[in-house]
Image (cartoon, grey):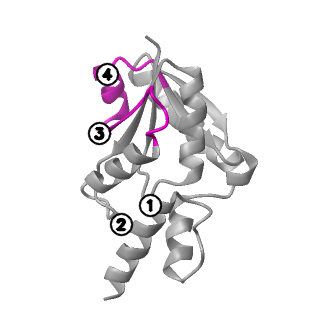
């Protein structure tokens, strides 16, 4: 079985993330969406909430499962018989960073990195940008799944008190 991983923080999951997962699911027998759990980083949504949202967002892909991980991605890959890391690239600046990470990962384990260019309609999309726009009252409903938009709206309202 050819298994790949799509890693990220997914805080929150965007339509761009789902696009990359969808396309990866056509290339590999199984895709594991791996949610990074780093307790030292401040996130808007907990790891459990992000895993739950991704599980729901990926329901339409029978060969995709969602899992959490902490520590090195290469260790997760070795523990789960993953042969490839799939990374979406939005711009040249993403490539510079992701190439360095790919080379580091391949020095730590026998793992390949597959770069998938984002679809043009998502080339500007980042979770941090979605959160920032939503925080200032902008409409992000076309950029994230409806249920994520509801959760984001609720969470931001809670934070405003």
Disc 3 or 4, which lies upstream in sequence? 3
Disc 2 or 1, which lies upstream in sequence? 2
On the image, the x and y values in percent for residue 24 come to 56, 29
Q: Nearer the viewer, residue 135 or 146?
A: 146
Give the label on residue 35, or none: none
Against 104, residue 48 (above or below) is below
Instruction: List the residue tagged with mark 2.
Output: 44
Residue drawn at (43%, 39%) of the image: 59
Q: Quadrant of residue 5?
A: top left
Against 59, residue 122 (above or below) is below
Foreground mark, 2 or 1?
Answer: 1
* Crowd class of label 4 (few under 14; some 14 to 19; many from 20; radius 10 Å): few
Disc 1 or 4, which lies upstream in sequence? 4
Residue drawn at (68%, 58%) of the image: 124
Disc 3 versus disc 4: distance between alpha carbons?
11 Å
Disc 3 versus disc 2: distance between alpha carbons?
18 Å
Residue furthest out toward the right: 120
Q: Secondary structure at mark 1?
A: helix
Disc 1 versus disc 4: distance between alpha carbons?
29 Å
Tell me: 69 left or right of 119. Answer: left
Disc 3 versus disc 1: distance between alpha carbons?
24 Å
Q: Secondary structure at mark 2?
A: loop
Q: Quadrant of the N terminus?
A: top left
Instruction: List the residue tagged with mark 4.
Output: 80
Instruction: List the residue tagged with mark 1.
Output: 147
């Amino acid at each position: 079985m050819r298994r790949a991983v799509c890693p990220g923080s997914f805080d929150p999951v965007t339509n761009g993330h789902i696009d990359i997962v969808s396309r990866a699911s056509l290339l590999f027998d199984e895709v594991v969406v791996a949610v990074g759990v780093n307790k030292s980083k401040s996130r808007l949504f907990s790891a459990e909430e992000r895993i739950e949202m991704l599980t729901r967002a990926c329901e339409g892909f029978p060969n995709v499962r969602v899992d959490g991980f902490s520590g090195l991605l290469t260790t997760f890959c070795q523990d789960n018989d993953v042969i490839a890391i799939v990374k979406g690239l939005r711009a040249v600046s993403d490539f510079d960073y992701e190439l360095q990470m790919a080379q580091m990962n391949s020095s730590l384990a026998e793992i390949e990195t597959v770069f998938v260019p984002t679809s043009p309609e998502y080339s500007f999309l980042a979770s941090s940008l979605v959160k920032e726009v939503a925080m200032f009252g902008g409409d992000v409903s076309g950029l994230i799944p409806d249920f994520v938009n509801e959760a984001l709206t609720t969470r931001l309202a809670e934070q405003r008190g």
